[in-house]
């Protein structure tokens, strides 16, 4: 069995923490490890790291590599989508990778899982996975259903029919319901939440794609390299819409472990520890006479007085305040920000790069100030800027700096000046992170004013 982890989504439902540049699968929520790391480790009792395939996009490659290194799963395979095309094309690409690059037989069982869910209860989870793998080996398209404990309107539902080898034949998939319909599903007793996890053999999924998505199947038949080349031509469609909702070969196995797709701030509140008043408090927060409230702070003090049933999430550039039960509307808020061209919709003030990260500390007409952190042994590209000059002040570590034809070392409490239109490079040859304060001056200070001449990360 091979595990396919989908890690290319740019989730917006946990804005402002999750944004396009750093989506929720890389966040640490109620745990010291990211959701992606937790997902990888969930399967290590079943398979080896080399049996795990992570599919993501080019923009998240360095995040994925860093997270895999954090859980000592460097041997896991990484497949890069040329463009975002939802889960059906992503799964087709992963299947072709398994056939052509890993040389797997067509009867190999694949288990596909999102990378941004919380699952607790490892023993029962592993037992359910093994049951699903057996059904998949028998030719079934298997889903994992979660028994609902409340009339949830944020999940799709699976309507279960007759029993089938430890699972149930799927009668229908239902869209996210309104409250009244969700209550009917809960009362009926034969409905499950759709977890988004699937198991199937390679033969099975290829036949299902041929039956219901011939466009995807035809391109996939051309091999991994050809599918990569034509990936942008594939429809933007989920595996649920593309195959599962149309097939008559689907069974669901109930997952009795605790499961949460943490797709909203209400869901985050549910999984976090709470005080005696029902408050979930993380960060520098001070609730006074508050109850049943989430307060999550990152960069400053949050003081709340008399709050009840509220969600308060703070970052250094956005404060989100919402009523509990209304957090599904966050996605609409982010879309509105995008329509207005607001950079907050996609970018954090801290941006991660293959070499490290930078944080915007302040900006105004003609200037921008950043804190730049370069990881040990890493270096930025050899580059120039047409519209700005830069002052670098080393506050930690030691920097090897190239400016024009000159190369020199710059240590703590020392600074250098990079003139406009001059080739330059910043490197960290040391064993500890290099930290500098960069002050930019010029008429145009956006990130696209970079001309690269040499780059170890292939961005030239």
Image: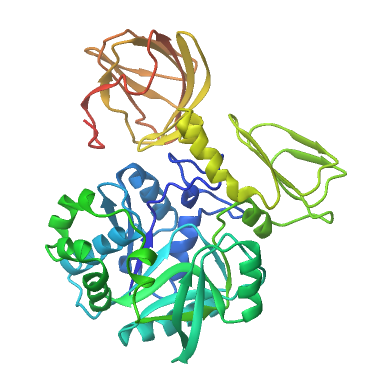
Which residue is located at x 62 percent, y 68 percent?
A: 182
Residue 229's spot in the image, x, y percent? 15, 50
- Relative to 281, say whether 151 is above or below: below
Depth order, front residue of 270/297: 270
State left or right for residue 266 relative to residue 35: right
**Residue 247 % position (x, y):** 34, 76
Work out which residue is located at the far right of the displayed protein and give it.
Answer: 289
> The N terminus appears in which quarter of the rendering?
bottom left
Number of marks:
0
Quadrant of the image occupied by residue 21: top left
Q: Nearer the viewer, residue 422 or 258?
A: 258
10 relative to 376, above or below: below
Tell me the residue at 23%/54% (across/down): 234
Q: Is residue 348 something one can see in this rendering?
A: no
The vertical placement of 390 against 149, above or below, is above
Figure coloring: rainbow
For the point 43% across and 19% down, which residue is it? 411
Residue 173 position, x and y percent, is: 46, 72
Nearer to us in this view, 327 or 247: 247
Q: Could you tell me residue 399's position as x and y percent?
A: 38, 23
- The answer to whether residue 440 is left or right of residue 279 is left
Q: Residue at 84% of width from left, 54% of height from top?
A: 277
Quarter of the picture holding the C terminus? top left
Task: Please tell me in which quadrant of the rendered image residue 22 appears.
Answer: top left
Do we see residue 94 in this rendering?
yes
From the viewer's side, name the closer residue of 326 and 346: 326
Residue 259 left/right relative to 273: left
């Amino acid at each position: 069995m091979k595990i396919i982890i989908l890690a290319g989504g740019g989730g917006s439902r946990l804005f402002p923490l999750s944004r396009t540049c750093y989506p929720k699968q890389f966040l640490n929520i109620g745990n010291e490890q990211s959701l992606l790391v937790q997902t990888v480790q969930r399967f290590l009792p079943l398979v080896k790291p080399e049996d795990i395939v992570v599919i993501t996009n080019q923009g998240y490659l360095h995040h994925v590599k860093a997270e895999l290194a954090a859980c000592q799963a460097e041997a896991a395979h990484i497949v890069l989508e040329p463009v975002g095309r939802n889960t059906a094309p992503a799964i087709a690409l992963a299947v072709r990778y398994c056939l052509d690059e890993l040389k797997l037989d067509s009867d190999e069982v694949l288990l596909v899982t999102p990378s941004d869910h919380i699952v607790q209860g490892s023993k029962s989870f592993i037992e359910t996975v093994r049951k699903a793998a057996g059904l998949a080996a028998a030719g079934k398209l298997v889903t994992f259903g979660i028994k609902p404990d409340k009339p949830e309107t944020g999940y799709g539902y699976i309507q279960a029919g007759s029993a089938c080898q430890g699972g149930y034949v799927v009668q229908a998939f239902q869209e996210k319901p309104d409250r009244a319909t969700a209550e009917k599903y809960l009362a009926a007793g034969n409905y499950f939440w759709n977890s988004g996890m699937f198991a199937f053999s390679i033969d099975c999924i290829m036949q299902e794609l041929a039956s219901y998505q011939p466009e995807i199947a035809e391109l996939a038949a051309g091999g991994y390299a050809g599918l990569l080349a034509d990936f942008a031509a594939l429809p933007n469609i989920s595996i649920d819409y593309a195959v599962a909702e149309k097939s008559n070969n689907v069974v669901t196995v109930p997952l009795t472990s605790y499961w949460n797709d943490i797709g909203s701030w209400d869901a985050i509140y549910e999984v976090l520890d709470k005080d005696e008043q029902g408050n979930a408090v993380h960060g520098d927060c001070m609730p006074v006479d508050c109850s049943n409230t989430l307060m999550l702070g990152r960069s400053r003090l949050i003081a709340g007085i008399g709050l009840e049933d509220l969600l308060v999430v703070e970052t250094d550039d956005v404060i989100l305040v919402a009523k509990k039960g209304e957090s599904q509307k966050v996605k609409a808020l982010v879309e509105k920000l995008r329509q207005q061209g607001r950079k907050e919709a996609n970018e954090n003030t801290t941006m991660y790069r293959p070499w490290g990260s930078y944080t915007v500390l302040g900006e105004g007409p003609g200037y921008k100030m950043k804190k730049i952190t370069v990881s040990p042994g890493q270096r930025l590209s050899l580059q120039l800027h047409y519209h700005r000059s830069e002052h670098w002040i080393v506050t930690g570590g030691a920097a090897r700096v190239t400016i024009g034809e000159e190369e020199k070392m710059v240590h703590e409490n020392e600074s250098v000046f990079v003139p406009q239109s001059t080739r330059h490079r910043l490197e960290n040859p040391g064993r500890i992170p290099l930290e500098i304060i960069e002050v930019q001056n010029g008429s145009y200070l956006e990130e696209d004013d970079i001309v690269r001449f040499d780059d170890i990360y292939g961005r030239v």
